[in-house]
Image (cartoon, rainbow, N blue to C red):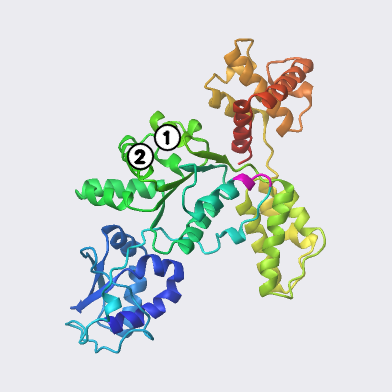
Amino acid sequence: MEELWGQACAELEKTVGPNNFNHWIKPLRLTSVDEGVARFASPTRFVSDWVNRHFAKDIIGELNRIEPSVERVRFDVAPQGVTARVRTAAQAPATQFRANGPAVSPAAPEMRQSAKADLCAPLDPRFTFENFVVGKPNELAHAAARRVAEGGPVGFNPLFLYGGVGLGKTHLMHAIAHDYQQRHPAAQVLYLSAEQFMYRFVQALRESTIMDFKGMFRNVNMLMVDDVQFIAGKDSTQEEFFHTFNALVDQGKQIVISADRAPAEIKGLEERIKSRLGCGLIVDLHPTTYELRLGILQSKTEAFRDQHPDLEIGAGVLEFLAHRITNNVRVLEGALQRLFAHASLLRREITLEVAQECLADILRTNDRKISIDDIQRKVAEHYNIKLADMMGPKRARNVARPRQIAMYLSKQLTSRSLPEIGRRFGGRDHTTIMHGVRKIEELAGEDHGLAEDIAMLKRLLEA
């Protein structure tokens, strides 16, 4: 079994990548091949289910290449300590393979040692601290993530990262996991999305394995949950998340969480969870600046040029992209990758004209104008007032202040003149609009909460 599995693993590592291999395939042990079924010992049901869903076809393909009788795989959860580390074919002892029986020679002593199952979901090898471009909008988040990755007493728990799409939350989460595991190889990191957390919880309830679930999530050194806003409104999942959170904090284990907005802004999230999250460090990844976007483009270009020295990019192309694609770093990087492919396949220099032609669809999308109607709807929804109140005469503070914020955002995010904005707010005079804009500018400088509200509304409108 060991020789067969060792040969298969040598190819599987190339097929699924080193990260996926180490996290998911390495903890498995091939125990038998009988009547076309390859049986594996797996450390946990979680690992069994994940491998079965994501890598079963790859495993069957590699085993079938060596032993044509293999048609299916089956995973059995082995008692703790049964699974062993798997070595490549070059490292595995030369044992005789028998399709219906165990290997002839016993495993080496080190092979009998238990291998702690790494339950971390697959991490992107590109998302490291070395590949993260730091600028003013994300420097605090980067510094906090670096500190958490070092391990040891941190001084804040959890670390809560939030911000709009494509601002680097997931990159920092993966970077923390990568760095922490390199510094602490024996430690166990569990990184997953809130949706996966809910899926595991529901499955545990359905299969009456809730104690296994609790043990799996409460015996890690670091728990990382992405997009925690997903569990908002899901009462049972929130209940279990709350108890898991408390158990880990009480043990001094680090928790890192990300979301698209601050805890207080997540509707449907229980107040006790919001309170718990607020006890840690909450860091906002602000929208990117022109300088940061240009830095990201320059970094990606240098990395690509290392592999393709003949790459030629005309003057002003990167500056043009940084200026035109402003709301999402993923879109920005995707645009650059498209230009790289264009230049590589057609062997053309990337000039400004080529960039405009090749990225016409992306540039048109990013030219979408934010309307005053969009602003009024979003502000009314955020402050839970009627849309009609934006244009109406009410002067109560709970209506007047949101109206002034909408006026301010209309001035900031649209090219409309003050008289035009006034007409869209119930025919108000341009001096009224000017007063509202100035009032919000003054208050935002003094009221941190208001400044956060405005920044979040901008992100939502620009997304």
- Amino acid at dot 1: Arg
- Magenta stretch holds residue 137: yes
Amino acid type indicated by mark 2: Asn
Q: Judge left or right: residue 250 versus residue 99.
A: right
Provide the secondary structure element on which disc 1 rests: helix
Q: Residues within 10 Å of mark 2 (few under 14, many from 20)?
A: some
Which residue does the numbered mark 1 point to in the structure image? 276
Rendered residue at 38%/34% (across/down) = 233
Specify the segment rendered in magenta.
136-140
Task: Where is residue 226? Give x, y as percent.
Answer: 46, 48
Q: Extreme right residue here?
A: 315
Q: Position of residue 344 (x, y in %)?
A: 68, 72
In three-dimensional space, the C-alpha distance between marks 1 and 2, rounded to whole angstroms, equals 9 Å
Residue 237 relative to residue 439: left or right: left
Where, quadrant-wise, is the N terminus in this rendering? bottom left
Q: Is residue 92 above or below residue 339?
A: below
Is residue 79 visible in the rendered structure shown here?
Answer: yes
Task: State which tag comes first along the sequence, 1 or 2.
Answer: 2
Image coordinates for residue 303, horizontal then vertical, percent: 66, 67
Residue at disc 2, secondary structure: helix
Structural crowding at the residue carrying mark 1, measured as other residues with C-alpha within 10 Å and reported as few (<14), some (14–19) or many (≥20): some
Residue visible at 24% across and 89% down in the picture: 96
Q: Does residue 59 sit above or below 363 in this rendering?
A: below
Q: Circles 1 and 2: CB distance less than 8 Å?
A: yes
Name the image quarter holding residue 85. Answer: bottom left
Q: Nearer the viewer, residue 152 or 380?
A: 152
Instruction: Please give the residue where the numbered disc 2 appears in the rendered image.
Output: 246
